[in-house]
Amino acid sequence: MAINKLSNFKGKIRGVANCASAGKEKVSTFTSSCTLTTGSGTRLLKTAVVAGGGGAAGGSGGGGAGGVVFTNVAVCGSSPYVVTIGGAGGGDTGGPSYPGPAGTFGAPGSNSSIGSVAVAIGGGGAYGVNYPAGGGASCGQGQPGGSGSGGANQGGACRTGGTGTPNQGNPGGRNVPGSPTSGGGGGGGFTAAGSCGTTNDGGAGGAGLDISTEFPGAPVTAVAGGGGAAGFCGSPSSGGTGGGGAGGGGGANAGTAGTSNTGGGGGAGGLQGPTGTYAAGAAGGSGIVLVKEKNNSRGMWPMKQQYEAVKEGAWPDGSVIESVTLDYLVVAGGGAGKSFGGGGAGGYRASGFGPAPLQGCAVVVCSASSYTITVGAGGGNSCGTNYPAPPASPPDGSGDGYGNTSSFDSYIQASGGGYPLNASCGSPWNANNAERGGPGGSGSGGYPSAIGAKRPGGSGNAGGYTPPEGNPGGSGGYPDNRGGGGGGGATGGGASASGYPGVPGGDGAPNLITGVACSAYSGGGGSGTDRGYPGIPGGTGGSGGGGNGAPGNPCGFAYSGTANTGGGGGGGTGGPTSYGAPTYQAPCGKSKYGSRGGSGIVVVRSPAGHPLSVTPGCNTVSCVCGASVAKFIVSGTLTVN
């Protein structure tokens, strides 16, 4: 086989001219789910990850093409990545007349992925005429996806195409508003939106992506074309290049399916002439994953190719990238305490250490890489300022009293602790049932109630994680002016009040990832009680930094959650203003009427002792029994060297 050589200006041979690509490459094609194991020196993948295309229905717009991740992706060498091939969205079995009975729909395509580093979204499935039943303005609307499906021929009513996913696809086309004989809109493709329908004719599917140059040996030359839409009395509509199925025109014309392993959208079924009904819509095409590994730069390279590769971030630097397994502790900021109710603990997530039922899987990262660490602040206003801090406390966790999220880059997140919700009509001692506990990593406690039904504590595990990151808060007492509920903790819910005394917050979780004995995190705040009953105790904070609630003594204070534990703040005292005017200015860390949540913490540990470094300088790295331990008390950057 001939070998091209690169010569200098005198014509002498300088070395092998590797002009085909930037780096020695290995190309892999996946048409079914499998595992990709990268080469030892691989650090970049050029990918075309194509999701399954959306199906179509009778009288619908075209099915949306599957989304495409067509880019360079950073990976580790000698590492396994699970490759998932998205299935095609199914088509329907025939549509109704218009006007007429309820219609049918095409199903969305399924996602394709390479582990978590590249995820392509399935194409939008198309709603047919009259679907969903009784849906009014939603009948026949295009649906979102990697690329969106087109709008249906809904008797002249405007039906827009569904939206596409940014950088993965385009929207579908619409029908012709005001035209009862309009065709539907074409499904979106990777490089173009679906065409709009015209009178009688359906719109063509949007064009897909030509991959023949980047992946010359692939079993297909183009991917992610949108499906053609249904026609009313006109000609069939074409699918987009890249496997889009054609839409049926007037007469007994069913749609055609998207091509397998292209992610093409399915074609819609056209009107069947004298019968007044629509033919069947078709399924989309299944997905595909194409991978080109780039791992070294052997040989001599023209400067232009080097420049272009460096500019794209695709020029190998010769370093060997290793897979590094890391254990972690990620604790979010605790929620603030308020009158009566204890604050919920920050969400707790861990691997390798702590209670076994709460341990997740370790994280595998790349060496020679940096990762963003976020340490969530505790909820509430600054120490010593007027309390309660937030003017409102919406249940979505956006108020100032909620704890803030902590995270280990995009791998692990923990939700901030809950904060008691505000009453709808003012005072916490009135008869309304609004001041219940707020949700969070762990939920806050509720207020006492003057009605029979207690005000419940907020729910925990706001992130919906497995294993769960926290527990609910306890209910407030009954009747009015009794103790509030305790905030939830990592290993237990907050206690519910039954009389005047405050009750404990839920316990946190012990965890020795730092090597420090007796360490615990994410304890719930204890609840407070009515300030008109001297000698009545407040609730104790849960182990793991939960703050104590305020007692009934007019001079008693609620304590904040401990810094860098994610502990919930202790609940304050409450009661009618006749018991004495509030004194809001309180020493840092404690207040009669509430307290701050404790800030979170993030700890990352390499059991094999792989070198780690951190910024800024108040974060630390230590060696514990041969392991490298990076401890973050403020947000910063972790570098795996």
Image (tube, grey):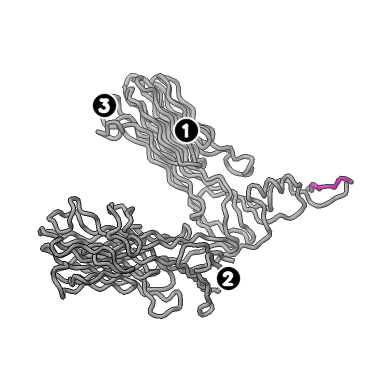
Is there a contact, CB below 8 Å, between mark 1 and mark 3? no
Foreground pick, 262 / 547:
547
**Residue where numbered disc 3 is placed:** 100
Q: Quadrant of the C terminus?
A: bottom right
Q: Which mark is residue 245?
A: 1
Q: Can you say whether 21 is above or below 603 in the image?
A: above
Give percent across and percent down for residue 116: 48, 55
Q: Earlier in the sequence, mark 3 or mark 2?
A: 3
Give percent across and percent down for residue 603: 46, 69
Bounds of the magenta span? 4-9
Is there a contact, CB below 8 Å, between mark 3 and mark 2? no
Q: Earlier in the sequence, mark 2 or mark 1?
A: 1
Q: Residue at x 12, y 64 (%)?
A: 478
Question: Is residue 490 at all visible to an observer of this figure?
Answer: no
Q: Residues within 10 Å of mark 3 (few under 14, many from 20)?
A: few
Q: Earlier in the sequence, mark 1 or mark 3?
A: 3
Give percent across and percent down for residue 216: 64, 42
Q: Secondary structure at mark 3?
A: loop
Distance from disc 1 to disc 3, alpha carbons, whole Å, reads: 26 Å
Foreground pick, 24 / 369:
369
Q: Which amino acid lies under the numbered mark 1 shown in the image of this protein?
A: Gly
Foreground pick, 175 / 89:
175
**Residue where numbered disc 2 is placed:** 611
Q: Is residue 7 magenta?
A: yes
